Image (cartoon, grey):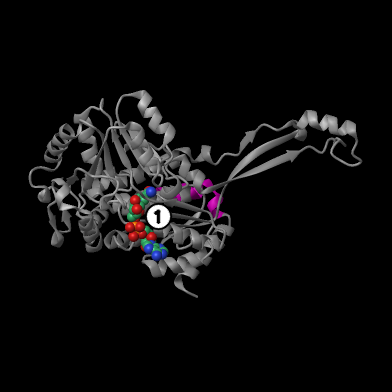
Amino acid sequence: MTEITNIINKQRDFFNSNTTKDIGFRKTQLKKLYAILKSNEQLLDEAIYADFRKSSFENYTTELSIIYHEIKLALKNLNNWTRTQRVGTDIANLPGKSYIIPEPLGNTLVIGAWNYPYQLSILPAVSAIAAGNTVIIKPSELAKNTSAAMCKIINENFAEEILQVVEGGIEETTLLLKEKFDKIFYTGSSEVGKIIMRAAADHLCPVVLELGGKSPVFILKDANIHLAAKRIVWAKFLNGGQTCVAPDYLLVEKGLKDKLVTAIKKEIQSQYGSNIKESEAFVRIINKRHFNRLLSLLDKSKIILGGNTDIDDLFISPTLMGDISFNDKVMQEEIFGPILPIIEFEDFDWAIKMVKERPKPLALYVFSNNTKRINKIHHEISFGSGAVNDAIMQLTNVNLPFGGVGYSGMGSYHGKYGFDTFSHYKSILKKTNLFEPSIKYAPFTSLKKKIISLMLE
Ligand code: NAD
């Protein structure tokens, strides 16, 4: 028996013991997770710095604080979320009672991506534990220091049968996918998402796929250009552009481009200083393969800002590309790096049509105060989540479900939505034994049919 089979067997037996159904047990695990993350912040900071040169400040704001908030939210709301809900009963079932019991799914697998290594692996695990499941986390092997850090602190503090980290790449993930889980929560590229879904199909295991894609930003003529530039520079170059919901490209209404480029240039200078390489706020590309992939997207003749690269330091400066059309190479795949192409448009309907013709984006942003035009975009284009006059910040609001649609994914999480994702809502109808109308039973008569039609329609 492999080590992986051994862990999953233990988790299966443990789940069947019903221990995780106890709300107190779940709260104890969540509190423990909170405590070990807090007491190991230095280790977690060092590991993420080694993987990307990500600062402690950014590790806190974009990873750990989000996990802490999610744990606290679950602890506060768990009694309420797990409560059996009474619902109305239809006339055909009276007298009777109807209710819905939230129940855990069982044994779950979380496969994380490398770009926000803590958040993307631990946040789904928080929801899974809150909902009463056991969890195996498989972090991305590309962020090897953060993967090792999570493995160390979780496996040293949690029993194998409750929560365990299994490190590794394709080989280990393939072994994991052979096992039967009750839910697989995957974050990563759409191509690997297909592999996950195919493997899950063998066990009819439900999946959540948190995928990527090209997230457009509309900048309309009435936009506040100064604020748009500030927010776009933050959102695009955060984590070196390696954010699934980062603005991928700008769709700028004719006449705005020069003003916008000037404002973006000013913002880059103000947020990262004149020597960007030395800025502690500017993160590196994860590895040489992604660095070279990004270089291949750069058309030197179209660079209007930045374009400085250093392979030894895995550094690519914030780069703007102008005169871009949907046919350029940079528009054929998700960029996932600090390169920002600008497409200008004159015809608003054409711009909407071009986005609609492409795979459904994970995120979409609009900078404008024109409610009619904003509503038109929201009405016509399908996408996972979005913001108006901002970018990325929608995912910090736990009242909003976070997830993709179509090619950018399926299922959602964050806050109560994460609890729902890892729960089954079991429906129960409880009938009285006091009496039983004969109406549904044979022999059938036309009078019975008439009465039934009055009740059922
Ligand atoms: P990745 O290379 O880290 O892969 C993700 C996971 O899949 C890893 O755990 C990896 O080990 C596993 N994996 C890779 N190849 C596999 C294979 N052949 N078989 C089985 N498992 C395999 O991450 P990535 O895919 O490069 O991530 C980047 C993508 O993820 C981007 O498209 C980005 O937009 C997307 N993403 C989405 C979200 C979201 O929340 N929707 C968040 C972050 C990243």
> Can you name the residue that lies furthest to the bottom here?
1
Q: Is residue 341 visible?
A: yes
Q: Quadrant of the C terminus?
A: top right
Which residues are the magenta region? 19-31
Residue farthest toward the left in the current orientation of the protein: 274
Q: Is residue 303 above or below residue 153?
A: above
Q: What residue is disc 1 on? A: 190
**Residue 237 image position (x, y, % from top left):** 22, 45
Residue 175 in magenta stretch: no
**Residue sitting nearer the eye, 431 or 43:** 431
Residue 126 seen in render? no
Give the left or right position of residue 83, taking residue 404 as reference.
right
Q: Which residue is painted at 50% across and 46% down in the image?
A: 421
x%, y% of residue 23? 52, 46
Q: Is residue 24 magenta?
A: yes
Query: Where residue 273 appears, x then y in whole percent?
Result: 10, 42
Q: Taking 87 as reference, is 196 left or right?
A: left
Rendered-image quarter of ligand 1: bottom left
Residue located 40% across and 60% down the image? 192
Query: Residue 89 is drawn in which quadrant?
Result: top right
Tell me the kind of residue under disc 1: Ser
Main SS, magenta region, reads helix
Between residue 339 and residue 94, name the one nearer to us: 339
How many numbered marks are there?
A: 1
Q: Dot 1, how many residues are within 10 Å of its Cα: few (below 14), some (14-19), or many (20+)?
A: some
**For residue 365, which quarter of the picture?**
top left
Q: Secondary structure beneath disc 1?
A: helix
The x, y position of residue 401, in whole percent, is: 43, 40
Return the residue nearer the eye: 255 or 285.
255
Ligand 1 within 8 Å of the CB at mark 1: yes
> Depth check: 234 or 437 in front?
234
